Image (tube, rainbow, N blue to C red):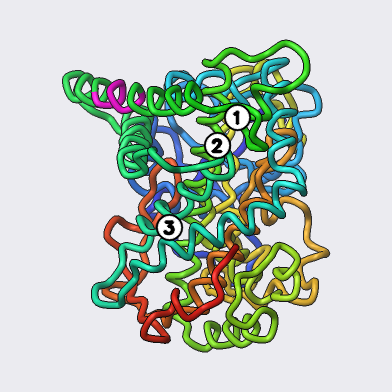
Amino acid sequence: MNWKAIPLVSGAAACPAHPPGRPAGPGPGPGPGDEPPGRHLRELRTAPLDLLRRAAHEGTHGLARLDAGPGACLVVNDPAAIDVVLADRDAVFFKPKMELWKRVLGENVLTSEGPDWASSRRRSVRITGARYVRRAARIVAGAADERLRHWTGTDPLDIHEEMRSLTLAATLRQLCGTDADFDLRAFSHHLRTVMECIHALESAPAAPAEHDDVRREFSRAATELRTSVLNLVAHHPGGRDDLIGLLTDAPGEPLTVRQVCDEVLAHLIAGHESTATSLAWALLLLAGDPAVTERVRTEIDTAVGDRAPEDADLARMPLLRAVFLEALRLYPPAWTIMRATGRPSVVGGVRIPAGAVLLVSPYGVQRSERWFEGPDEFRPERWLGGGRNGDPKYTFFPFGGGRRSCPGRQLALVTGGVVLTRVLQGFSLAPVGDPLRAAVDIILRPRPGTRLRATPRQPEPAGHRKESR
């Protein structure tokens, strides 16, 4: 079957919500001349989540077709077809649009292909192994306790910014041994600028002069990010059991300072931004569900009391883990994964040409009624008792999949568990303002300014609790 035989996804106004229990069929595509070429481009830029959910309902052969301009653009929805694309056993698919990210990150596990990627991946696996996961629990608990001392309960918290600050400090300590003398606020600001600029340049139409302004802003922020990490690497004392120490003291041909900077930047950005976003969503969801929050707090009291949890303690708190997984299901930070075909391929029995763009959307699949009952509802209990063990592999994949799956998955789960524990031990949560809404950027984050109120359960929660050591 040729890719052009896949029906086009319907337009936003023509597609009512798909009723539960009714099989999704391809349906007839728009007739010739019904809509202008590139009919899905505007929605991809302004309301991509709605479009991806419709694509999940209307696809056939595990694929749905978008009209996004010249060439093939397909959304991959079926778990078996997703496996073909992400596993990439025949080395057909690659990550497109990496030029801007390479200017920030250089060559590493996030940006490279081929042998360079394989070498960087091996280095990544070393720093995310079990030994470092155990150590990370203590580091994260310490960073959490320091941050939570500033939560007085007087004013509502911009919870996403709070979690970004906390996880950035923790990630720096894991990767570099310390966050002293590092301007966390400036780094966070420049990173946000880089992400917003890349999103604007790659997705939003603008006049050439506007693009020039964005490019200049991007260049300034990218230079600041790289300079801050180059200084960090240059002044590292060596011999430490952290990422810089592993990279500078590794056997074989030594890495240059620039190569070490590339690796540290990749782990610094990937290691804190997605986890911070998932923590913010988890806390916002808990703030809106007092019954679940109390059940989690009871579980924490039974498992660890008021002390900071170790890695091994988290296994005794399944509901806490389920809350974090449910936040990842509802709001996966990497809401879509893009691949391009380097040569002709077959996916789901459909012939796809070289140069095609394939969109794999964790958001679209994880909110599909095909795989999850009440897909828009916060139901952490769905993850308890092995209830999802029989599902196909790619019905839940917030960490990606295949050879490019996130090597820091376990670190993220441990960080999430430790931070949620420390917050719930010390604070009661309440929502503030409007219902939750997502801001679609490079990551799927809460709308800027989304707040919650965290009221100390004791007059001085951090001082009365057993602190991490």
Residue 163: assigned label = 3
Q: Secondary structure at mark 2?
A: helix
On screen, residue 389 above or below 287: above
* Coordinates of residue 100 in the picture (x, y in percent): 42, 22
Q: Nearer the viewer, residue 448 or 60?
A: 448
Q: Magenta segment: does it hold 219? A: yes
Distance in Å between CA atoms under marks 3 and 2: 19 Å
Circles 2, 1 touching at the beta carbon (< 8 Å): yes
Q: Is residue 34 visible?
A: no
On screen, residue 107 above or below 416: above
Q: Residues within 10 Å of mark 1 (few under 14, many from 20)?
A: many
Q: Magenta segment: does it hold 393? A: no
| Count of marks, rendered view | 3
Residue 213 left/right relative to 243: left
Q: Secondary structure at mark 1?
A: helix
Dominant secondary structure of the residues highlighted in magenta in the image? helix
On screen, residue 217 above or below 128: above
Q: From which residue to which does the magenta span run? A: 217-222
Q: Secondary structure at mark 3?
A: helix
Mark 2 is on which residue type? Cys
Mark before the other along the chain sequence, 1 or 3: 3
Q: Residues within 10 Å of mark 3 (few under 14, many from 20)?
A: many
Q: Please name the residue that numbered disc 2 is placed on.
A: 176
Distance in Å between CA atoms under marks 1 and 3: 24 Å
Within the image, what quadrant is residue 453 found in? Answer: bottom left
The quadrant in which the N terminus is found is top right
Residue 121 left/right relative to 412: right
Q: Please name the residue that numbered disc 1 is placed on.
A: 244
Mark 3 is on which residue type? Met
Q: Nearer the viewer, residue 84 or 292?
A: 292
Task: Name the residue rendered at 24%, 26% in the picture.
Answer: 217
